[in-house]
C-alpha cells in the first residue's frame, strides 16, 4: 500500500503542475505547489503512520476494515490516475 501511496504522490505532483488537477487534501494543498519533495515526504509519513496504527490494531474489526478500505481507496486512486494519463496520451496523439 505504501507503493500505491508513492504512485499517488507522483501522479498528483504531475497533474497539479500540469494544471490538470488540484490536491484534495487541504493540509497538503499549498505544499504540493511549493515543495514537491516535502509534499511527498509528508504525505508518505502521514499515510505510513496511519497504516502503522491500523496494523497494530489489526485484531480489531474496525482496524481491519480501515486497512481494507485504504487498500481499495488507493487502488481506485491509481485507476483514476491511469485514466487521466490515458486521456492525456490519447489527446496528445489526436
Image (cartoon, helix red, strand yellow):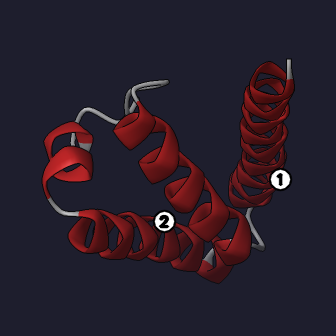
At numbered mark 2, what does the secondary structure look like: helix, strand or loop?
helix
Q: Is residue 46 left or right of residue 74?
A: left
Residue visible at 72% across and 64% down in the picture: 4
Q: Is residue 47 left or right of residue 33?
A: right
Residue 61 sits in which quadrant? bottom right
Q: Are the residues flagged by discs 1 and 2 in contact, CB closer than 8 Å?
A: no
CA separation in Å, label 1 and label 2: 14 Å
Q: Residues within 10 Å of mark 1 (few under 14, many from 20)?
A: few
Residue visible at 21% across and 46% down in the picture: 33
Q: Which label belongs to residue 52?
A: none
In the image shown, does 86 or 74 lie closer to the viewer? 86
Q: Quadrant of the C terminus?
A: top right
In the image shown, does 14 or 29 lie closer to the viewer? 14
Q: Position of residue 63 (x, y in %)?
A: 69, 59
Q: Position of residue 88 (x, y in %)?
A: 73, 29
Q: In this rendering, is residue 9 above or below 42? A: above
Q: Is residue 80 left or right of residue 34?
A: right
Callout count: 2
At numbered mark 1, what does the secondary structure look like: helix, strand or loop?
helix
Q: Which label belongs to residue 47?
A: 2
Q: Quadrant of the N terminus?
A: bottom right
Q: In this rendering, is residue 47 above or below 57? A: above
Residue visible at 75% across and 38% down in the picture: 85
Q: Residues within 10 Å of mark 2 (few under 14, many from 20)?
A: some
In the image shown, does 78 or 53 lie closer to the viewer? 78
Q: Earlier in the sequence, mark 1 or mark 2?
A: 2
Q: Nearer the viewer, mark 1 or mark 2?
A: 2
Q: Is residue 3 left or right of residue 90?
A: left
What residue is disc 1 on? 68
Q: Position of residue 93 (x, y in %)?
A: 85, 28
Residue visible at 46% across and 25% down in the picture: 21
Q: Position of residue 13 (x, y in %)?
A: 43, 51
Amino acid at each position: 500500500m505504501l507503493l500505491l501511496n508513492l504512485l499517488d504522490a507522483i501522479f498528483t505532483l504531475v497533474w497539479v503542475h500540469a494544471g490538470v488537477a488540484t490536491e484534495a487534501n487541504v493540509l497538503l494543498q499549498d505544499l504540493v505547489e511549493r515543495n514537491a519533495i516535502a509534499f511527498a515526504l509528508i504525505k508518505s509519513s502521514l499515510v505510513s503512520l496511519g497504516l502503522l496504527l491500523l496494523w497494530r490494531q489489526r485484531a480489531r474489526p474496525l482496524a481491519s476494515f480501515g486497512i481494507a478500505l485504504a487498500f481499495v481507496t488507493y487502488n481506485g486512486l491509481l485507476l483514476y490516475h491511469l485514466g487521466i494519463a490515458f486521456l492525456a496520451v490519447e489527446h496528445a496523439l489526436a
